[in-house]
Amino acid sequence: MKQFSVALAGNPNVGKSTVFNALTGLNQHTGNWTGKTVEGCAGVFSHKEALFSVTDLPGTYSLSSFSREEEVTRAYLLEKNFDCVVIVMDAGTLERNLSLALEVLSLGHKAVVCLNLYDEARRKGLSVDTKQLSAQLGVPVVKTCATKKQGLDDLKNTVLRVCTAEQAPSLPSFNCKTDALLVQKISREIALRCVTETNEGNKTERDRRLDKILTSKATGIPVMLLLCGLLFWITAVGANYPSEGLSALFEMMKHELSALSEMLAVPKFLSGIIIDGVYTTLSWVVAVMLPPMAIFFPLFALIEDSGYLPRIAFNLDRFYYKCGAHGKQSLTMMMGIGCNACGVTGCRIIESEKERLIAVLTNNFMPCNGRLPILIAILMMYFAGSGFGLGSSLRVAAILLMILVFCVLFSLFVSKILSLCLGKKVPSGFALELPPYRKPQVIKTVVRSFLDKTLAVLGRAVVVAAPAGAVIWLCANLQIGEMSVLKHLTNALDPFGRFIGLDGVIVMAFILGFPANETVIPVMIMAYLANGTLSDFASYEELLRLFTQNGWTLTTAVCMIIMTIMHFPCSTACLTIKKETSSLKWTLLSMAIPAVCGVALCAVVSHILPV
């Protein structure tokens, strides 16, 4: 069987990764903003007794090597040996796409132009003469609609034909830095010859009307806040019932495991570590994390696939610019709501090293999915009012939205300070494409989000929670004198905890929660009950009663909320920061900044609010 190597190149938002998915069958995540793919992804497909290895290169607007995406794509196209490059273009924005296409063709590779999203161009009233375009570029042009798997067989046949051909296209060799104006001029001339506008498409007009609302200075921010509030409300309401069901199921299984342990005469110390430590911690993490993630991530992915997330970045860009940060930081902050480690990784899309570092150091101010259940629990107990019905969930969602706004504002404040401390520099430009609004593929998006995000994040949490459960159980059961190690530690931390409106148990819970934030509340329950076992709670009323008996007040709850959103990142996020910055100094600083801010703010609040 013949083997060929193929590269996929193109602008962001042209469906390049979707073409890659359709060709290879891999479930590579696609997104609607610049730089979603920041490293090449590989896959394979077979066609007519030939095997093709395909590399999906990062989406980029040019080969000028200003950003990491451009560096990766340019380096691959210049240094790697491959048989053909497939240049994916958006049929609805041909002129803009032609600039990169001409730069890639000028490198002398065998090439095929994949004119994707042709159905959307047709709905806009645009028609592209593919024969004329092929004649102008000197390479084959194939129309596709990758989301509907249309035109893929033609693309495969063409790629096979080009790979087996001996001669590459002959085009002028452009210097992409000095001949940029020439490339733009040629692109414009080619587009005029090949594109016919038959009528003003209804879809384009609809997009313009929506953008007048969603990106307006008057309505853009309020609509964004309402949408986020609705997202939080659905998550808070929907996660409660399955969380209780999973908790009850795991508790029943725990009783069965305990009975089995007794029947097999397993030593109490070993059964304690395995059942009361590891199993109970894992069951808590799954019961608390899985339901909100299974709701939040798919809903967030639907918003993402609709094309709305770039509009959020557009609305927030001016605020980040004034703080010496980059507008793309708003995207990484939104990613941080799901997982701070993902948010930190997403900072790669920021070209400037200084602005990228600011985004990394401030990402932890956004409460990740591991901290959202803690916030929801505290809000339900102390701020939901009487009962826990529909009105309570609405109130909780509103307060949670206000907390999110506070987090964004505080991150802007810290970003401004960091921009001054890291040296003066004019923020780099922010070129953000607003893609067309698209109807999300609901079933595919939900399944993909559950597999790629929910289970992936849950898996990482489970990996760190298992050893954490064993350590927590040992601390609670190993005695020094008449008290456990955990009791000694909480007593030692109690004066500091009282000074910042908390207590030693809460401070110790955050420390032990470093591997996984989801263990913070169960550690507190275990310490307050002093039973040496991680415990669950049957209802918010029972948990509220336990906390109140141990001295919690409204001030304690407020300081607990502050410390939840402002403390050091979890171990997974810290490892990611170390990997992204290649610096222990910046990793330690990323831990110190939110922790110091949280301690200082808690100290101020605890001395202002009444007990």
Image (cartoon, rainbow, N blue to C red):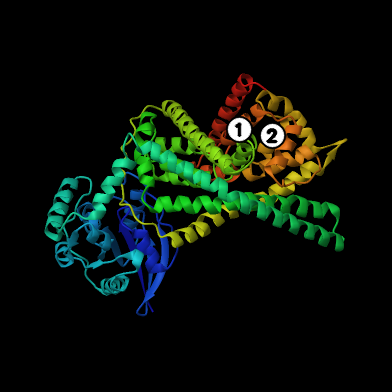
Along the horizontal axis of the image, is 257 left or right of 38?
A: right
Locate residue 129: give its quadrant.
bottom left
Residues at discs 2 and 1 in contact (Cβ within 8 Å): yes
Along the horizontal axis of the image, is 561 left or right of 482?
A: left
Q: Which residue does the image show at 32% across and 36% down from the upper left?
A: 428
Specify the label residue 563 is tagged with: 1
Query: Which residue type carries mark 2?
Result: Ile
Residue 460 shows in the view: no
Q: Position of residue 330 (x, y in %)?
A: 41, 39
Give the residue pinned by disc 2: 506
Along the horizontal axis of the image, is 41 left or right of 74?
A: right
Residue 113 shows in the view: yes
Q: Secondary structure at mark 1?
A: helix
- Of the pair 2 and 505, the residue shown nearer to us: 505
- In the rendered view, tell whether residue 24 sits above or below residue 295: below
Q: Position of residue 425 (x, y in %)?
A: 35, 29
- Of the pair 586 and 214, the residue shown nearer to us: 214
